[in-house]
């Protein structure tokens, strides 16, 4: 990434923050969300769901950018993200202070 | 009596839960099957398009893809094999206010149902046809289909497919479809945008979506589901407006994706009404 210049407005741009939710018993463990999360913050958990698959879990909740890709690639409608409170565009909030306050601990 | 039930904390629900029959979840599709992603894109597009969902009908034929209609919480029809398009045509002609979505598989739409497809396209019946192309008959155990690539292995071509597959966008274009696009299920945002365009335009619109069938096609062709998705990422190229004749599916070369046709011409209902319902 060295050769990319930093955008001039990088300081002001509000990065959206998300909270990831699971409908755990729908998951069939395909791993698509894990593989294609741009922030690489999902991993297979050691838990079993009702159908004996290992649903994913979030490793670094504060890094989710609410891009919804996990939600739209999931064939099972088993994962989705919602905007973290306080990070809606328009609310003056800098990326750095959105982090630790808005994301619940990983279940 | 005074005991108050403890209020469960309100979990937000999946944004598509209002559009699916949640009592039927989890669906029947195998782990890693791409049909679910296309189904999800289709529902996202239905929501985003703003069309009246009380006047929207999803119709499927038979096959794994054909189960789609049964999971959508709109009026839906699970029809006989290959006959999704004629059912949809009947409904549309009887009630032109309806938005018709045909959600079905490559075998259903292009083998047993191939004739219906070409004629609905020729007549420009106003409907959106979404074909989940998983290159085989998934439901019945992975037999060769009219879309199976040459030399690919299936249950009925154990040494390789001697036939050539259909180029579906070319077939749709040649038959008269007024909108033709192709994506893979990994291009889920583009699939959603394409379907949204189809839902808000007039005429026969066709979207082919390549999707893995890991259990049947994948297993026999040494492709694990994540390999297939990697291939969709590395071996495709988007060329809107590309010549439909050059859209063969060969992942050894590049598979071309994009919107290839988007033209206007009077629909069947418009012309019919002009001639027969003058008032
Ligand atoms: C009249 C009739 N002929 C044959 C069948 C058997 N059959 C069921 S599904 C299917 C093929 C489905 O293939 P496709 O449309 O590609 O769906 P997929 O399962 O791959 O999603 C066939 C041949 C049938 N159900 N009815
Ligand atoms: S919303 Fe985006 S960043 Fe957050 S977990 Fe899902 S894919 Fe990753
Ligand atoms: S994409 Fe969906 S089904 Fe696949 S592992 Fe993730 S949550 Fe589970
Ligand atoms: S058999 Fe193939 S197409 Fe059918 S649900 Fe399984 S993976 Fe999907
Ligand atoms: Mg098929």
Image (cartoon, rainbow, N blue to C red):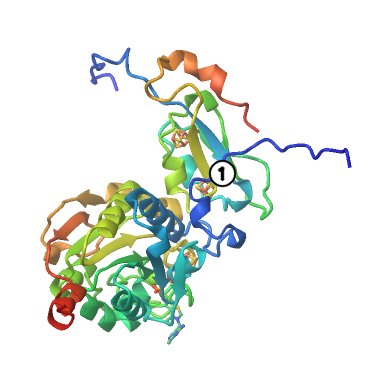
Locate residue B196 relative to residue A88 in the image: left or right: left
* Residue lying at 42% horizontally and 67% vertically, measured from the top left: B217
Residue A47 location, x and y as percent? 68, 42
Q: Who is closer to the viewer here, B132 or B69?
A: B69
Q: Who is closer to the viewer here, A28 or B189?
A: B189
Q: Taking B91 as reference, is B255 above or below it?
A: above
Locate residue B62 relative to residue A79 in the image: left or right: left
* Residue lying at 40% horizontally and 15% vertically, measured from the top left: A92
Q: Quadrant of the N terminus of chain B?
A: top right
Residue occupying the far front of the picture? B279
SS label for mark 1: loop
Residue A93 location, x and y as percent? 42, 15
Q: Quadrant of the C terminus of chain B?
A: bottom left
Question: Which residue matches tag 1?
Answer: B13
Q: Quadrant of residue B153?
A: bottom left
Q: Quadrant of residue B164?
A: bottom left
Q: Taking A26 as reference, is B220 above or below it?
A: below
* Residue lying at 13% horizontally and 77% vertically, measured from the top left: B274
Q: Who is closer to the viewer here, B273 or B10?
A: B273
Residue B136 location, x and y as percent? 38, 72
Q: Taking B253 as reference, is B98 above or below it?
A: below
Locate residue B204 relative to residue A98 in the image: left or right: left
Residue occupying the far right of the picture? B1
Q: Determine if residue B251 is in view.
A: no
* Residue lying at 20% horizontally and 71% vertically, measured from the top left: B172
Q: Taking A101 as reference, is B175 above or below it?
A: below
Q: Determine if residue A69 is in view.
A: yes
């Amino acid at each position: 990434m060295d050769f990319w210049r930093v955008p001039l407005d990088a300081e002001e741009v509000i990065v959206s923050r998300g909270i990831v939710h699971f409908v755990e018993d729908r998951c069939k463990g395909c791993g698509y969300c894990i593989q294609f999360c741009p922030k690489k913050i999902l991993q297979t958990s050691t838990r079993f769901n009702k159908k004996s698959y290992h649903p994913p879990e979030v490793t670094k909740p504060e890094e989710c950018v609410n891009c919804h890709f996990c939600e739209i690639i999931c064939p099972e409608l088993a994962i989705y993200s919602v905007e973290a409170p306080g990070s809606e565009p328009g609310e003056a909030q800098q990326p750095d202070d959105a982090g630790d306050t808005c994301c619940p601990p990983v279940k | 009596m005074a005991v108050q039930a403890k209020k469960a904390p309100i979990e937000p629900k999946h944004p598509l839960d209002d559009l699916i029959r949640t009592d039927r979840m989890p669906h029947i599709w195998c782990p890693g099957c791409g049909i679910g992603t296309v189904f999800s894109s289709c529902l996202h597009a239905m929501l985003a398009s703003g069309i009246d969902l009380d006047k929207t009908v999803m119709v499927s034929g038979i096959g794994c893809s054909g189960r789609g209609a049964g999971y959508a919480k709109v009026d839906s029809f699970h029809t006989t094999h290959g006959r999704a398009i004629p059912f949809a045509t009947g409904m549309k002609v009887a009630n032109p206010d309806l938005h018709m979505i045909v959600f079905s598989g490559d075998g259903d739409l292009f083998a047993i149902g191939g004739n219906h497809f070409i004629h609905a396209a020729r007549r420009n019946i106003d409907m959106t046809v979404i074909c989940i192309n998983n290159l085989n008959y998934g439901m019945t155990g992975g037999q060769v289909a009219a879309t199976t690539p040459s030399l690919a292995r299936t249950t009925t071509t154990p040494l390789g497919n001697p036939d050539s597959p259909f180029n579906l966008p070319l077939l749709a274009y040649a038959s008269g479809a007024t909108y033709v696009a192709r994506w893979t299920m990994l291009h889920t945002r583009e699939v959603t945008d394409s379907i949204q365009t189809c839902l808000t335009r007039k005429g026969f619109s066709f979207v082919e979506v390549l999707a893995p069938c890991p259990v049947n096609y994948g297993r026999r062709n040494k492709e694990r589901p994540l390999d297939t998705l990697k291939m969709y990422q590395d071996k495709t190229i988007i060329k809107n407006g590309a010549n439909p004749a050059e859209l063969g599916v060969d992942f050894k070369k590049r598979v071309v994706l994009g919107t290839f046709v988007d033209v206007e011409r009077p629909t069947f209902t418009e012309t019919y009404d002009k001639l027969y319902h003058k008032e």
